Image (cartoon, rainbow, N blue to C red):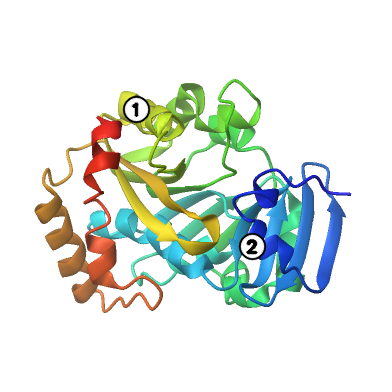
Amino acid sequence: MLKYTQAASAHDAIVRGMGEVLAQGRTAFQEYLFFRSPEAGVCIVLDGDIQSCESDEAMYHEALVHPAMLLHPEPRCVLIMGGGEGATAREVLRHASVERVVMVDIDREFVGLCREHVPAWSAGALDDPRMELRHEDINAYLPGCSERFDVVIGDLVDVQDFDSPAGMLYGRELYGRLRECVGDDVVVATQAGALGAADVSGHVHIRDTLAGVFGHARSYGMVVPSFFHMWGFALATSKAPPTTDAELASTLCDRARGRGLELPAVGVDALSHAFTLPRQIRQQLG
């Protein structure tokens, strides 16, 4: 039986109302549970922690993907690290300039379960002719990679222990390998944990590691209701991005309008101001 950690506390309202169990078991890499909630629709739990819910997965994935895609002037080649649900690829492929996407997710079985139980989340992206789907460890893929990516999106598991194997997915060694596979104008975005009112140390670790490798990194956040937190993201560039919140907002809005991009879950205006965080959280971030 699955052990509910965060799902038993912060996510208790959703789990308590759990309805039909769609799938439950263990792949070679993680425990999984797909269930239908009256409040949140289909939900995915991995190793006891809710990963996504039908009701608001688009809020998370739009916030994860589009700041990086919009800050690059013309993203053509994109790497997705993780992203097994296919929703990250869905959002990437909404940009008409994209010619190639490489998605590296180690867990073939989990991707298959998502195809079966939440096919609408990928909206056909995993079968798009521009997509190459690889099932291998990202640490094994990067050393032999000959691509030059314009944008990299990290949609990997959240971690609490950065000395654990999962924590290495946010380590300087992996980002150093990644740096060798990207162009000079690269933009990198990754999920970076909760921006809680009392503790942002995990987020700061990820952001500062990115800054140490790529040169520049910024924090931003978006409220994702099923996570019961403002969720944090980190964006890194090798060239200095617009320096003020107002300049960032203007760039994101202008490029979204220029590309005809609408964000049905978040909205362009809200996304453009995601870098303007509450003062209490900003003070903790430093």
Residue 96: image quadrant is bottom left
Residue 87: image quadrant is bottom right
Q: Which residue is mark 2?
A: 13
- Density class for disc 1 (Cα within 10 Å; few <14, some 14-19, many ≥20) is some
Residue at horizontal 26 percent and vertical 41 percent from the top: 280
Mark sitting on residue 268: none
Q: Quadrant of the C terminus?
A: top left
Residue 69 visible here: yes
Q: Which residue is mark 1?
A: 208
Q: Circle 1 — which element?
A: helix
Q: Nearer the viewer, mark 1 or mark 2?
A: 2
Which sits in the foreground, 31 or 235?
31
Q: Amino acid at mark 1?
A: Asp
Marks 1 and 2, how far apart at CA: 34 Å
Q: Amino acid at mark 2?
A: Ala
Residue 180 visible here: no
In the image, residue 118 lies at what x, y percent?
68, 72
Q: Is residue 256 left or right of residue 22?
A: left
Residue at horizontal 51 percent and vertical 61 percent from the top: 88
Instruction: Tell me: residue 122, above or below residue 183.
Output: below
Q: Is residue 78 left or right of residue 89?
A: left
- Density class for disc 2 (Cα within 10 Å; few <14, some 14-19, many ≥20) is some
Residue at horizontal 82 percent and vertical 70 percent from the top: 22
In the image, residue 74 lies at what x, y percent?
27, 60
Q: Is residue 48 left or right of residue 176?
A: right
Residue at horizontal 87 percent and vertical 54 percent from the top: 25
Which sits in the foreground, 8 or 37?
8
In the image, residue 2 lies at what x, y percent?
83, 48
In the image, residue 181 lies at what x, y percent?
43, 36
Which sits in the foreground, 258 or 159?
159
